[in-house]
Structures are given as structure tokens and as C-alpha cells.
Image (spheres, rainbow, N blue to C red):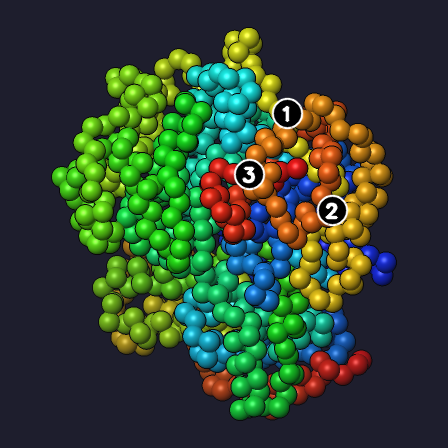
Amino acid sequence: MGDGILSSGRGNSSSNRPEWLQQYDLIGKIGEGTYGLVFLARIKPPSANRGKFIAIKKFKQSKDGDGVSPTAIREIMLLREISHENVVKLVNVHINPVDMSLYLAFDFAEHDLYEIIRHHRDKVNQSINPYTVKSLLWQLLNGLNYLHSNWIIHRDLKPSNILVMGEGEEQGVVKIADFGLARVYQAPLKPLSENGVVVTIWYRAPELLLGAKHYTSAVDMWAVGCIFAELLTLKPLFQGQEAKGNPNPFQGDQLDKIFKVLGHPTQEKWPMLVNLPHWQSDLQHIQRRKYDDNALGSVVRLSSKSPAYELLSKMLEYDPQKRITAAQALEHEYFRIEPLPGRNALVPSTPGDRVNYPTRPVDTSTDIEGTTSLQPSQSASSGNAVAGNMAGAHIVTNRSMPRPMHMGGMQRMQAPGMTGYNVNPNAMGGGMNPAGIPMQRGVANQAQQQQLSRRKDPGMGMAGYPPQQKSRRF
Amino acid sequence: MAANFWTSTHYKQLLDPEEVDVVHPLDRERGVTVEDFKLVKMHMAQYILRLAQHVKVRQRVIATAVTYMRRVYTRKSMSEYDPRLVAPACLYLAAKAEESTVQAKALAFFIRKLYAEEKPRYERYEIKDILEMEMKILEALNYYLVVFHPYRSLTHLLQDAGMDDMTQFTWGLVNDTYKMDLILVHPPHLIALACIYIASVYKDRDTTSWFEELRVDMNVVKNIAVEILDFYENHKLIAEDRVNAVFNKLALKP
């Protein structure tokens, strides 16, 4: 940015396609969420970065007619300031004044921890090798330490927000993504619930579940602990059932899941406990069942004497003031013993252990305009899904015809039972590619750059929506 | 970054005074002088303040909005970016950036209210106009939205100097610095120090040794203080008719 490629030109008369889009080959849609859609694109010549893959996150205009969503504003605000190897890189911002949409272009990342864990659990059926776990965790902590030392709390860390670069110079490098909920915490932060934000509960720290009003960086460390355990066992550590309701229901089941594994917190170990609203008001409910034993070691199958266990239990310390910080965790003995963590987390020193992770599925049928605009000024024809898809087909034709579905792409396809989770009434409608045509394998495998974040969509009113659910399914 | 001024985009974007006082060629063609330019920005800063008092946002939001407005006019012309729309749109954007979101509807309501109460020279801008301008401002700012203000350092410095009783007085001085372009030129803590310096001279406090221990360039601090004092000298009040005259110039085709 700042190099003159930021642009906002209005589309020509025949379409609402913004001019800036011409610098990219649009390949297809790779994700969607409450904020909007995510597309995979490739920078065209004559740019010096030609051939580079980028992910374009399109923010819908906010529904309440209030312009650019505050989430997008804050994400841009933070991303424009930060720069770190383990934090996703914003390479461009574009606006389209015609439909008042806003686009963030990121380096594209082929993988994320959600998909890596899922691949191990459901496909190869074996645990992630210790080198990869340790390298992923170290880099995650390294990026988080950078954020925390700059007074930024992420607030929504979960496996799908932790990206990993695919083939290329940065292969196996972790990138923390999705800063829509991140905040600078020099000023006291309002609870997310007051901003009408719903986030995943599985990675939520106990002090927040118990009603703490203010966030500290310790909430991110709790999430890292949960992710660490999930990397080890391939299963979410605390899979609570989310309580629905407004505005911010007490998540009793989530707490129960935590207590079951870690034992009940006590005032001796956590002095501030008694001051937390839900501990006070729901004492009977919370303490209805007593779990005294700490079962963490058996759940994650680690010896209580191992450095890995020691580090994990410090991340899952109840008292946020005693919880290990990112800086302290990086110094932990776990990272000083073999196997030592490395920059390419995906390629362990013993080549035999290498796992080839699948590439992201790409829906080439969805155009950048494929989402229904709320802007009434947009012509009826360009606003509907059919026209949108026609435009999309046009673009794709320019770079490479979508081929009939490759079997290779099937491995990324959603399990049949899960298709219901991602119905986006706006974007998917009748325009959804019924064949789920994936990106050509060749293209996918060349992906050298990365990133893109897709946030689980908590706002689509999906009953029983588990936090893990990808909202992009093709 | 966000908590460290010296690595922030705010620091990297600081300008020399000569770069700030440049009238855009399109405005110059219409006869707008540097003095006119400063006057309009000052007037719009006042307008943002009045609007902000209606929609009830913190001082910090106001300061950020004024900074955005001033940054916009280091790059864009007033002829193309009507200050009377840029100002409320900056307030609208700043409120989002500072997590005090204001509804466009509410803002448009108070714009109409101010319009009815006061000068007829305000265009009747509507919600749609504010939303469009919000995007244009984002682009004009090159999407750099983090702004550091003197208030935070002011509080710390006053405590350190044992001058807590001067909080209100110096806070008011800092507020007034947004009628100038100081925030585009100087690191905020130096602006805070200049305000403390003025306060200590004005209230006859001996802060010489305290300033010496700070290891800051006192020449810079004193120069900022002089600029602030000059401003008070020259702009006891904003001449409404002069502002109107500039708006008339801007509306005229060359």
C-alpha cells in the first residue's frame, strides 16, 4: 500500500466490477463468514509481484446502513500498524464505492490449524508429529508475544485463525490471522457481548465465562493452551454446548467441561474468583458437581513430569494473573529440548514423517460480485446470483477454464452431514456450484504465498452451530 | 505499533510545517490562501467539536476526527472534498476507530439541527453522503487510522512534575492545539510538554529542573509553546464572515 495501487475507481457502465480488480486474476471463493466472503486471486503482470497468490476478504456493507463495519475499520487499523513474520500480512486495501464494499488483500496461506488437525484426525488417522506441534506452538507464541508486547489482544484465537503457509519460501510458517476482534488494550475494553459480538466458546478463558468485565492478554494464552492440547490429541479440549440467548448467556456447560478436566477452581488458588459475577450469582449451579481431580494429564496423554505437560498446565492456569505469558512460554524448557522447533513447521527433520496437507478448496463459480449487495442502487441484474456467476465464469475463463471436478479436490469436500452449516442465503442461493468444482490442482500446488482468514460465522443463526464449523463449504 | 509511538505509522507520517501549509493547486486556483486554508480547518475543527458534543463522544474521538480531517487536507483539495462533509464524516469514522460508534442516522440528525440553529452556509448533507465520504476518507488516509494524542502523556507528565492541580488548565490547552496542525507535525508528548511549559510560565511555577531531567529538546518544546501562544494572539475568535468568504471562493469556478 502507499505504492499507488490503492484505488477506488467506479466500475464501467456495463458492470459494477471495480477497476482495481483488473490487477488480479480472480480464481474463486475460498471462505465466507458474517463479515462477507473470501476469494483467492493471483496478481497479474506487470506487477513485480505477478503470480503471487493473495486472499481477498470482502466486507459486506453493514446491514444497519452504517457504512463500513466497525469490525473492518478496527481490523484495518491494527493490520496497518503491525508487521511480524508470524502475523498475517495485509498487502492491500480496496474500496468499491458503487456498492460501498471494502476489500482487504492478504498474502495467501494454504493451510490452517483447523484443517491440519482435521486432516490428521479424519484422513491420515495419526497424531501430528512432535516437531510440527512444537514448531507450530512456538511460532504461534512468537506472533502472540509480538502482539501482546504491542498491547494488542487478539480475543478470538482458535485453530481456524492460525494459518500456515503452503509451498514456497515461507512454507510451514505460522501466521496469526483475523484481527476483527483484536483490540489495543491501553484503554479498558468493553466486553465483546456489549458490542454484539459472538465468539467461539471452546477457547474462551474461565474468567470471561465467569463474567469478568475486562479482557487481558491472558485470555489469548488460555486459547493457546486449548489449541496446544488440540494439536496433541486432535480433539478440542473443552467442547462445551453453547447456551443461546441474549445478550450474553452464562455458559455453564463450557465451564463444566473445563472443571471436569482441571478440577474446580478454588479461592486459594485464584483469589479474585469470588469477585466474578457468575461465581457469585450461580454458585450453586456452578458447584452443583464437584470435580476435584486434575485429569489434564490423562486427557492429553502426557506424563505430569514432561515439559510439554508443565507448559500446557501453565497456559491453563485458572488465575489469569498467574497464567504464563507468551514471553515466558517462549523461554520454557519444552522449547529447549529435542526436537527443537523450526521455521518450517510442516517439514520435520526426518523426511519420512512428512504429511502432505490438502490445499484449500476453491469455489470457482462465485464471482467477487456473487454476494447479494444490500445497495438498492445496484441494478437488479447485477445483484442476483445468476448474473454474478456469469461474471465469475467470465473471469475464470480468462485464466483457466474450470475443469470438471478433480477427484483430488474431493478430499477437501465437506462430509455430507455438514453441508447444512454453511448455507449463506445471500451468496450461495441458486448460484452455488453444484459440482463443487475445486481449484485446479496445479494451481493450488503452486500456491506460494498465503493467507486468509475466515472467521466462523456465528451470526447465521445455525442451530447447534459448533464453533469449529467452517462456514465455507462447497 | 499500537502502543509504541516510535514504531507507529503516526510517527512515520509526521510532516514538516512547510508540507502542511500547502494549499492544494485546485484550491489555489480559486484564490484560497494559506491563511484561508488554516482558517477553514480551524473552523471545521470547531464544527466537529460542536457536533461531537451533540452525539456525545469522548474527547479522544474528537481529537482523532480532527486529526483525520487535517490529514485529509494534506492530500486532497477542499474544492473536491467539501470540508462541511469531510468534517462530520471524519467524526463518524473516528467514532468507529475509537470504539464509540455513532449511528449515521444520529449524526445526520444533529447536522440538520446545527444547520437549523446556525449558519445557512451548511449544505444539507444526508446519511448517504456521509457514508460515501467515509470511504473516500479511508482512502485519503491511506488506511492509516491509529492516532496518538497528547492526553495520555499529559496525565503522566503532570503527575511526574507534581502538577496534578494543573490538569484542567493544561487539558484545555491541549484541546486548543487541535485548532492548529501541531498533531501532524510534532510527537504528541512534545505537544503535551509545550502545554505544561505554557502552564508553568503562566501560573509561575518553577519547572526548569524538571524539564532539564526529561532529556527532551527544550528548543522544540519552546517553539511549540510559542506557536500555541501566537495562535491565541491571532485567533481570539474565528471571524465567521471570513470563513464564509473562503467557502464562497471554493464554490466559485476559476
Q: Which mark is residue A42?
A: none
**Dot 3: element:** loop
Q: Is residue A280 visible?
A: yes
Residue type, mark 3 in image: Lys
Q: Residue at x 51, y 17 (%)?
A: A125
Q: Residue at x 33, y 18 (%)?
A: A301
Q: Are marks 1 and 3 in contact (CB under 8 Å)?
A: no
Q: Chain of mark 2?
A: A
Residue B63 image point, x, y percent: 47, 68
Residue type, mark 1 in image: Gln
Residue type, mark 2 in image: Gly
Crowd around label 2: few <14 · some 14–19 · many ≥20 (10 Å): many
Q: Residue at x 61, y 74 (%)?
A: B127
Same subunit: marks 1 and 3: yes
Residue A434 image point, x, y percent: 73, 38
Q: CA distance from mark 2 to mark 3?
A: 20 Å
Nearer mark to the viewer, of 2 and 3: 2
The residue that label 1 is drawn on is A411
**Dot 2: element:** loop
Nearer the N terminus, badge 1 or badge 2?
1
Nearer the N terminus, badge 1 or badge 3?
1
The residue that label 2 is drawn on is A431
The residue that label 3 is drawn on is A470
Q: Quadrant of residue A18?
A: bottom right
